[in-house]
Image (cartoon, rainbow, N blue to C red):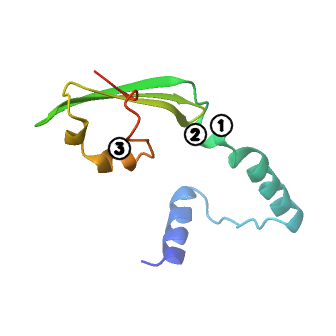
């Protein structure tokens, strides 16, 4: 079934109790109002995603090398702070791709806390 046939069947189902229905075509001015409303309201962060309050996320997972504990502070839809805790001593045992892919400085020894 193509999209035009689907549309027709959908409209027929919506108006099953009516003999006929007429399709309304928006004027150029009405389309302008639709686009203005979209730009002012429906394209905004609050409409699409809602208010984004501050929150924290903590995830722990045990691997062969030990346990890793990730903690994130999120505000305004962005990660504002990230801390990684672990229960093993050798930083070299933590896969570097997991750190560098987050854009973190792997040479900062103060970043890692036991």
Nearer-the-camera pick, 60 or 107: 107
Identify the secondary structure beneath mark 2: helix
Q: Quadrant of residue 50?
A: top right
> How far is disc 1 from disc 2 in space, using C-alphas?
5 Å
Identify the mark at residue 99; answer none if there is no mark: 3
Quarter of the figure that contains the N terminus: bottom left
The image shows residue 91, relative to residue 40, as above or below, that is: above
Specify few, some or many for label 2: CA neighbours under 10 Å numbering under 14, 14-19, or 20 or more. few
Specify few, some or many for label 1: CA neighbours under 10 Å numbering under 14, 14-19, or 20 or more. few
The residue beneath circle 2 is 49
Specify few, some or many for label 3: CA neighbours under 10 Å numbering under 14, 14-19, or 20 or more. few
The image shows residue 82, relative to residue 35, as above or below, that is: above
Nearer-the-camera pick, 101 or 51: 101
Q: Which of marks 3 and 1 is in front?
A: 3
Residue 58, percent from left and from top: 35, 25
Identify the secondary structure beneath mark 1: helix
Farthest residue to the left: give it. Answer: 64
Identify the secondary structure beneath mark 3: helix
> On the rendered structure, is 64 left or right of 1?
left
Residue 28, percent from left and from top: 86, 67
Q: Looking at the image, tell me whether mark 3 or mark 1 is earlier in sequence order.
A: 1
Residue at image point 19% right, 40% down: 93
Residue 71, percent from left and from top: 38, 27
Tag 1 near tag 2, CB within 8 Å:
yes
The residue beneath circle 1 is 46
Nearer-the-camera pick, 102 or 49: 102
Residue at image point 58% right, 30% down: 52
Q: Nearer the viewer, mark 2 or mark 3?
A: 3
Tag 3 near tag 1, CB within 8 Å:
no
> On the rendered structure, is 69 left or right of 83?
left
């Amino acid at each position: 079934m193509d999209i035009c046939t689907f549309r027709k069947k959908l409209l027929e189902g919506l108006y099953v109790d009516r003999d006929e229905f007429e399709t309304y075509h928006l004027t150029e001015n009405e389309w302008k109002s639709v686009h203005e409303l979209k730009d002012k309201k429906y394209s905004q962060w609050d409409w699409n995603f809602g208010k984004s309050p501050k929150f924290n996320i903590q995830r722990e997972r045990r691997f062969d090398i030990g346990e890793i504990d990730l903690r994130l502070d999120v505000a305004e839809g962005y990660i504002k702070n990230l801390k990684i805790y672990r229960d093993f001593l050798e930083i070299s045992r933590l896969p570097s791709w997991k750190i560098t892919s987050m854009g973190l400085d792997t040479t900062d020894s103060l970043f890692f806390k036991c």
